[in-house]
Amino acid sequence: RKEVEQDPGPFNVPEGATVAFNCTYSNSASQSFFWYRQDCRKEPKLLMSVYSSGNEDGRFTAQLNRASQYISLLIRDSKLSDSATYLCVVNMNTGFQKLVFGTGTRLLVSP
Amino acid sequence: EPEVTQTPSHQVTQMGQEVILRCVPISNHLYFYWYRQILGQKVEFLVSFYNNEISEKSEIFDDQFSVERPDGSNFTLKIRSTKLEDSAMYFCASSGRKLKETQYFGPGTRLLVL
């Protein structure tokens, strides 16, 4: 089983749509969870951390289910500028951080 | 806003040559990392560095690789004898004074080994 698994997509949605991405991770001892965004040929940029209680940042909502080892990201009212690859990222270490990345889910928002 | 910088942005080298990739982490950060991303593939952890020593390294980070913090600002990744399969984007990242703070990534160096 892959350490962090995501549907690669692409997800093609019209502007204004709501889209959801899912991710599963294999190590139940994983410590912290993130969604990063990566534009083509650019560096990953932190979108948001993911907490067990769920958290929201504007149009973005992230959820974590530790029992199912499942992470989700919901984007409401999609904008053209949301087009990017969304990376599910897990820190598997209790000590020094070691981020493990999923392959990413590509989102294309069209007018 | 403080940011991680990397030089060069692109590097082309011949197989067997040594390359040094340079990074300037965010100034008050204490934890430093290198990752790589082969074209079309996922980002992979290479090494983490704290207090002038390696704290963890992956299987990818073999004897051909080394890291160094030669002064108070730079953090370097050296590949001693490059192979074709070392062609990738190399990202430096840094995080702050607490162990589990967010990692911030530099813009990357695209390395092409011919």
Image (spheres, rainbow, N blue to C red):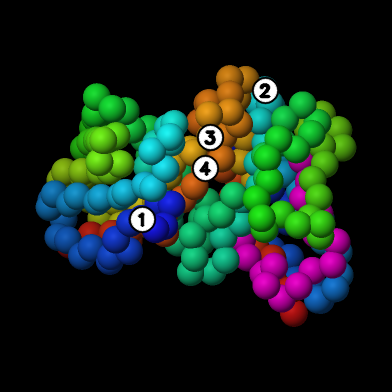
Whole-percent x and y of residue A9? Answer: 28, 65
Question: A82 or A70, which is in the foreground?
Answer: A70
Residue at image mark 3: A93
Numbered badge on residue B86: none
Q: Label 1 marks which chain's residue?
A: A
Q: Label 3 marks which chain's residue?
A: A
Pointer 3 and pointer 1: residues touching (CB < 8 Å)? no
- Evaluate whether label 4 is on the same chain as label 2: no
Whole-percent x and y of residue B89? Answer: 61, 61
Q: CA distance from mark 2 to mark 1?
A: 34 Å
Q: Residue at x 29, y 34 (%)?
A: A66
Q: Dot 1: within a 10 Å radius of its alpha carbon, few (fewer than 14), some, or many (20 or more) residues?
A: many
Q: Dot 3: within a 10 Å radius of its alpha carbon, few (fewer than 14), some, or many (20 or more) residues?
A: some
Question: B49 or B105, which is in the foreground?
Answer: B49
- Magenta residues? B74-89
Residue at image mark 1: A5
Residue at image mark 2: B28
Q: Secondary structure at mark 3?
A: loop
**Dot in front, 4 or 2:** 4
Q: Secondary structure at mark 2?
A: loop
**Dot in front, 2 or 3:** 3
- Could you say which quadrant of the image residue B26 lies in? top right
Numbered badge on residue A99: 4
**Dot in front, 2 or 1:** 1
Asked if residue A24 lies left or right of residue B48, the reply is: left
Question: A100 or A13, which is in the foreground?
Answer: A100
Q: Residue at x 23, y 63 (%)?
A: A11
Q: Dot 2: within a 10 Å radius of its alpha carbon, few (fewer than 14), some, or many (20 or more) residues?
A: few
